[in-house]
Amino acid sequence: MSSDKKFKLDGKDIPFHDGDTIMDAVLRAGEYIPHLCHNPEFKPNGSCRVCVVDVDGRHMSACTLPAAKNMEVDNSSEVILDQRRSLLQMLFVEGNHICPACEKSGACQLQAVAYYTRMLSPHFTHFFPRRSIDASHPDIIFYFNRCILCGLCERASRDVDGKNVFSISGRGINSKLVFNSPTGKLGDSALSATDKAVSVCPVGAILPKHKGYEDPIGERLYDTKPISVVGDVAANHSANDSSRNGD
Ligand code: SF4
Ligand code: FES
């Protein structure tokens, strides 16, 4: 018996369950809506807006909007693609995302989503912020320049690791990630290299030490297939680690 709980994504029927967001239903159906602050393993927080879609004439974030019957969702018009590109361009100029010098290149969701949306230039003037690096942890290095404040490490540390190591402090342009430790240094926090929070970062802000550039060019996560096919970094991170360890 076929369910009548469906909406249209670019003209295609997408079935949904009670409680689904548009993103939940679309990902389950094997379709793709670009996203950065969303990870299917965590409650959405709707901060990056890269998942913007047109729903019956209104621009909404797909990761937070509950699915409803007979919605018409536009995920691919030039207007929507343009809006996503502008958001990505703002993220690129607000931090220092120098892809050729970043070891996350090829496995970075920001870079992969920019390729997917055919972003060809940063368009806006670069801020070139001078933010620090925290290398105080024995196994993890943190680049403040690359953090896009998606909040995934905060949610993972709180909800999965039970540690609350990360939180976003301040508002607007003054927002920044802070570490919960007596000195404010990552090395004095309770973070471990095996924590979920370490594997969820969609960019190269949280990186493990001692294994930089381990995956050669051509074999990195998004080197051969686009993010619309490969999916999220966190799920693949675990898979890659398992295969590397021979699990
Ligand atoms: Fe998101 Fe990474 Fe910044 Fe954490 S460090 S808020 S996961 S970009
Ligand atoms: Fe929906 Fe970031 S993925 S707002």
Image: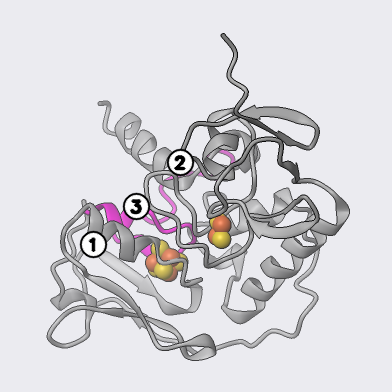
Pick out the residue farthest to the right: 78
Q: Earlier in the sequence, mark 2 or mark 1?
A: 2
Amino acid type, callout 1: Arg
**Residue 210 appears in view:** no
Residue 239 in the image: x percent, y percent?
37, 34
Q: Is mark 3 within 8 Å of ligand 1?
A: no
Q: Quadrant of the C terminus?
A: top left
Give the total number of marks visible in the rendering.
3
Q: Is residue 169 left or right of residue 225?
A: left
Kind of element beneath mark 1: helix
Residue 19, disc: 2
**Secondary structure that dominates the magenta span:** loop
The span shown in magenta is: 195-219
- For marks 1 and 3, the one nearer the N-term is 1
The tag on residue 199 is 3
How is the structure coloured here? one colour
Residue drawn at (34%, 39%) of the image: 238
The image quadrant where one finds ligand 2 is bottom right
x then y, percent, for residue 136: 22, 77
Instruction: In the rendered structure, find residue 158 and report the number of the disc placed on it.
Output: 1
